[in-house]
Amino acid sequence: MLKDEKAIVVFSGGQDSTTCLFWALETFKEVEAVTFNYNQRHIEEIECAKKIAKELNVNHHILDMNLLNQLTTNALTRDDVKIEEGEDGELPSTFVPGRNLIFLSFAAILASQVNAKHIITGVCETDFSGYPDCRDAFIKSLNVTINLSMDKEFVIHTPLMWLNKEETWKMADELNRLAFVREKTLTCYNGIIGDGCGECPACKLRKNGLESYLSTREGVKG
Ligand SMILES: [Zn+2]
């Protein structure tokens, strides 16, 4: 049934959203991608997203969300804020308040313009780093709110919600896209594509997940 329908993927060019894009391409008849430009630490992120969308022949919308940067101070949008993991009960310095609220709302407006019923986001509660707007309850609540606001029946899909990084790599592998995701996506806070700098929190999370997935896979084969 989903094979007849159209979807918009919230797409950053990172591991998670690229895996979601491949999932959507397998699941829906027609897929478009949307990337938000909010002066991320690295403009490479936008360029990386553009390149992937082009290679996959996916119609790609880039929306200017600089407003978000004007409102908040955090490590993803300001060079003078250091990337720090949150202490117990504290949010990390990479948290952008309201980001998914804003992004998914704009994605829904775009979806209504292009007649897409489905919205896909790579948010994940398992590795959510303390971000409240990555939680399942928030996404479900927002889905209801967006539908009420536009009198539509959008469905927000979160294929990674309950997966850890290891399982996200497994998903990419099952979609036959492990090498693509590994080599062409950008997760690193220092803007290095593929395996990244290896040192920042995003690289560490990605690398640990990949290593444990690859060792499990080898174990199964052996
Ligand atoms: Zn890194």
Image: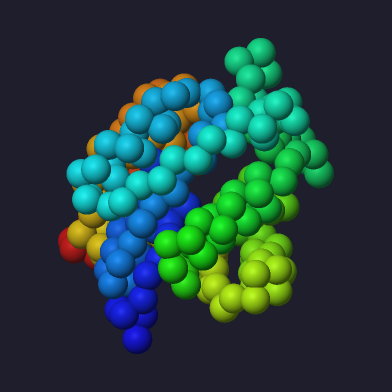
Residue 86 in sight in this render:
yes
Considering every residue shown, the one lying at the far top of the view is: 80
Query: Residue 22 placed where, x, y %?
Result: 30, 59
Task: Name which residue lies at 50% across and 27% down.
Answer: 189
For residue 150, above or below residue 51: below
| Front-most of residues 215 and 176 | 176
Question: In this picture, is 168 found above or below 55?
Answer: below
Residue nearest the viewer, comparing 204 with 128: 128
Tell me which corner region of the image, top left, top right, bottom left or bottom right, holds residue 123. bottom right
Q: Residue at x 22, y 50 (%)?
A: 56
Image colouring: rainbow
**Residue 82 falls left or right of residue 49:** right
Q: Position of residue 23 (x, y in %)?
A: 34, 64
x 36%, y 76%: residue? 5
Is residue 151 found left or right of 52 in the rendered image? right
Residue at the bottom extreme, as displayed: 1
For the image, the number of numbered tags is: 0
216 or 5: which is nearer to us?
A: 5
Q: Is residue 171 left or right of residue 135?
A: left
- Residue 46 lies, with reference to residue 1, above or below; the image says above
Query: Could you tell me residue 210's position as x and y percent?
Result: 36, 46
At 62% from the left and 56% from the top, the residue drawn is 105
Asked if residue 160 shows in the view, the reply is no
